[in-house]
Image: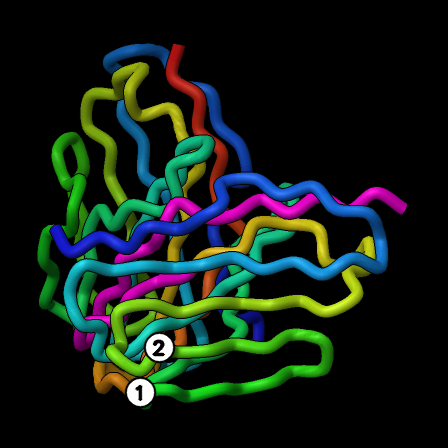
Amino acid sequence: NAGVTQTPKFRILKIGQSMTLQCAQDMNHNYMYWYRQDPGMGLKLIYYSVGAGITDKGEVPNGYNVSRSTTEDFPLRLELAAPSQTSVYFCASSYSGTSNHNEQFFGPGTRLTVL
Amino acid sequence: GQQVMQIPQYQHVQEGEDFTTYCNSSTTLSNIQWYKQRPGGHPVFLIQLVKSGEVKKQKRLTFQFGEAKKNSSLHITATQTTDVGTYFCARGSNYKLTFGKGTLLTVNP
């Protein structure tokens, strides 16, 4: 199993550009998440999904959109990039929503810079 | 939101010294998870604690969950250079995690 994969690894955007960060998992996990990590600030939840066709906002959703058309894929869309979106983005997945089985598996991350 | 506070923010130790990081909440935690993130890497799950007063060990790492389920700690005995990284606690609520800001551990060989 590849686990959770993310592409690209690095990206530089100009202000106002758009892009999609890709995330895929091959563990048949129901739950998928997008986080951003800023230096010294821990991880902040952007969006999450509890299954194909279902998504919901996390703590910091403004400026982002997601979709979940399949169990495997959970892309994150930035429509109008702003310098405040410079961050490292992590995708994660977990098997179940129950409190005893929600270990999250993280992808390697995408380092995004908006200039 | 329901945050968790981690202290200290940074800790520098000599190899062989012990290290402890603490995670505190103002509200009762249903469970707490701990993750480790190596420099330049991604968070990796270490453990989950669910029961009041629970203590779990993984080799040199000891995890505790407070009796009131409002705090947790991670203790590393005799640190090694391989222990460097940021240690995060995260409160679990159904299918979501809220992460603390983490404790960055550096180890001087």
Q: Is mark 2 on a helix, strand or loop?
A: loop
Q: What element carries label 1?
A: loop
Q: Main secondary structure of the magenta part?
A: strand
| Mark 2 burial class by Cα count in 10 Å: few <14, some 14-19, many 20+ | some
Q: Residue at x 45, y 75 (%)?
A: A26
Number of marks in the rendered image: 2
Q: In this view, does A10 lie to the left or right of B80?
A: left
Earlier-in-chain disc, 2 versus 1: 1
Q: Distance between the residues labelled 2 and 1?
A: 6 Å
Q: Which residue is drawn at 38% across and 37% down?
A: A41
Q: Which residue is drawn at 9% across and 57% down?
A: A56
Q: In this view, does B64 lie to the left or right of B90?
A: right
User: From which residue to which does the magenta span run?
Assistant: B89-109
Q: Which residue is drawn at 40% across and 71% down?
A: B33
Q: Name the residue under label 1.
A: B52
Q: Residue B7 location in percent, x, y?
A: 44, 48
Q: Residue B52 location in percent, x, y?
A: 31, 87
Q: Residue A66 location in percent, x, y?
A: 18, 49
Residue A40 found in image quarter: top left
Is residue A51 something one can see in this rendering?
Answer: no
Q: Which chain carries label 2?
A: B
Give amino acid for label 1: Ser
In the rendered image, residue A65 lying in the magenta stretch gets the answer: no
| Mark 1 burial class by Cα count in 10 Å: few <14, some 14-19, many 20+ | some
In the image, residue A63 sits, relative to residue B103, either above or below, namely above
Q: Which chain carries label 1?
A: B
Colour scheme in use: rainbow
Q: Are marks 2 and 1 in contact (CB under 8 Å)?
A: yes
Most foreground residue, A30 or B100: B100
Q: Name the residue under label 2.
A: B66
Give amino acid for label 2: Gly
